[in-house]
Image: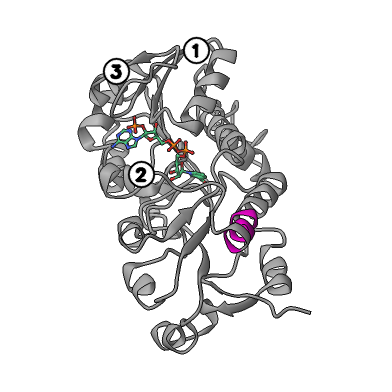
């Protein structure tokens, strides 16, 4: 029997059906999250390790990369990689893989769930019924707004943005988008100005990457352009929206509503957002279905296996 290959696992995959068990079964895993002093753990166990598994939540810093002199592959669970130091990895010729495509449909489905829930007050209505208020107060909850046939603006027409747009055409929506450059293959109108897109849209869905390039892209100006009848939906990353500006715009009635799966300082959600009954707030569950999480786990492990067997990951991050 050959000895198991040693790898580093940065965090525990609590949101994945069997990733922890599969990794522990097939590899000699240095479970980094169990060490109070990570630096000391890396110094003690790091030499000779060629592969590390992580996620956007756990990250992989330049310091970590530096502490692993033999590292050649970083295999991440999830598509976003803003907390992985890609530049530091590239400088060392380290391959980085993520798990694109397998989560696209579920994240797009959730964006739609958020959009309809906010417009039709589904979460509000659910709270109303559970509280026993129905029948005790006159009438029902306030009227919502129609979704079908409205104007859908998408910020970031990548894999997930396109899947959201495709669903929009099924709802007879007029779809436009903004990103850094127009796409030749997209049948939707491109808006070079994000403010113009927001001013046009009834629903503005954020589907960009996270990280410094998109930090506070959804600014006070964008929110005010969206206006009192507009709804902002975010399934990308919390810091893409200026959360303080969003709270102020909501309180001042300058933006209508928001439906958010992600927040600027997760898992902290500001009380001002929690207090607003017009909002729909979810705990970052865009990809959280059994099917998608299993596929993310399979692809992350397939990348690891492929690297260890052939020296190449299957789905490298390309920047
Ligand atoms: P993708 O295919 O790489 O698409 C990202 C899009 O963002 C591209 O269209 C890109 O277009 C656009 N973009 C990048 N920088 C921009 C900027 N400065 N301004 C405007 N647009 C910009 O990625 P994906 O697979 O669709 O995933 C998108 C993101 O969703 C991930 O990075 C992740 O953060 C998030 N996500 C969230 C969940 C969740 O649980 N809520 C789950 C999965 C993924 P250009 O390059 O043309 O600008």
Q: Magenta segment range? A: 301-308
CA–CA distance in space, label 1 to label 2? 32 Å
247 sits left or right of 186 in the view: left
235 sits left or right of 180 in the view: right
Query: Residue 151: x percent and y percent?
Result: 42, 15
Q: Which numbered dot is residue 319? A: 2
Badge 1 marks a residue whose secondary structure is loop
* Contact, mark 3 vs mark 2 (Cβ under 8 Å): no
Badge 3 marks a residue whose secondary structure is loop
Badge 2 marks a residue whose secondary structure is loop
Q: Quadrant of the N terminus?
A: bottom right
Query: Residue 226: x percent and y percent?
Result: 30, 25
Who comes first in sequence, dot 1 or dot 2? 1
CA–CA distance in space, label 3 to label 2? 24 Å
Taking the spot 67% from the left edge, 46% from the top edge, the residue there is 289
Query: Residue 191: x percent and y percent?
Result: 29, 18
**Quadrant of the displayed image that contains ligand 1:** top left
């Amino acid at each position: 029997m050959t000895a198991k290959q040693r790898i580093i696992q940065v965090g525990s995959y609590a949101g994945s059906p069997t990733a922890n068990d599969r990794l522990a079964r097939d590899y000699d895993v240095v479970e980094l999250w169990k060490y109070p002093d990570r630096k000391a753990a890396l110094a003690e166990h790091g030499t000779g390790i060629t592969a590390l598994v992580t996620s956007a939540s756990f990250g992989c810093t330049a310091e970590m990369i530096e502490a692993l002199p033999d590292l050649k592959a970083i295999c991440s669970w999830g598509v976003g990689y803003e907390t992985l130091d890609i530049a530091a990895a590239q400088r060392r010729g380290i391959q980085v893989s993520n798990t694109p495509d397998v989560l696209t449909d579920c994240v797009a489905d959730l964006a739609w769930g958020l959009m309809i829930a906010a417009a039709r007050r589904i979460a509000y209505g659910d709270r109303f019924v559970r509280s026993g208020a129905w029948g005790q107060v006159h009438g029902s909850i306030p009227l919502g707004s129609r979704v079908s046939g409205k104007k859908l603006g998408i910020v970031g027409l990548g894999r997930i943005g396109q899947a959201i747009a495709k669903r929009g055409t099924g709802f007879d929506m007029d779809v436009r988008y903004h990103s850094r450059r127009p796409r030749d293959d997209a049948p939707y109108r491109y808006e070079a100005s994000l403010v113009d897109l927001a001013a046009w849209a009834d629903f503005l869905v954020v589907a960009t990457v996270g990280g410094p390039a998109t930090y506070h892209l959804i600014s006070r100006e964008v929110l005010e352009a969206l206006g009192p009848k507009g709804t902002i939906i975010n399934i990308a990353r919390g810091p893409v929206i200026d959360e303080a500006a969003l709270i102020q715009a909501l309180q001042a009635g300058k933006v209508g509503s928001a439906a958010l799966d992600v927040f600027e300082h997760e898992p902290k959600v500001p009380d001002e957002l929690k207090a607003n009954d017009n909002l729909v707030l979810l705990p970052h569950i865009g990809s959280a279905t059994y099917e998608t999480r299993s596929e993310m786990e399979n692809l992350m492990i397939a990348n690891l296996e492929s690297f260890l067997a052939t020296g190449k990951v299957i789905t490298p991050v390309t920047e």
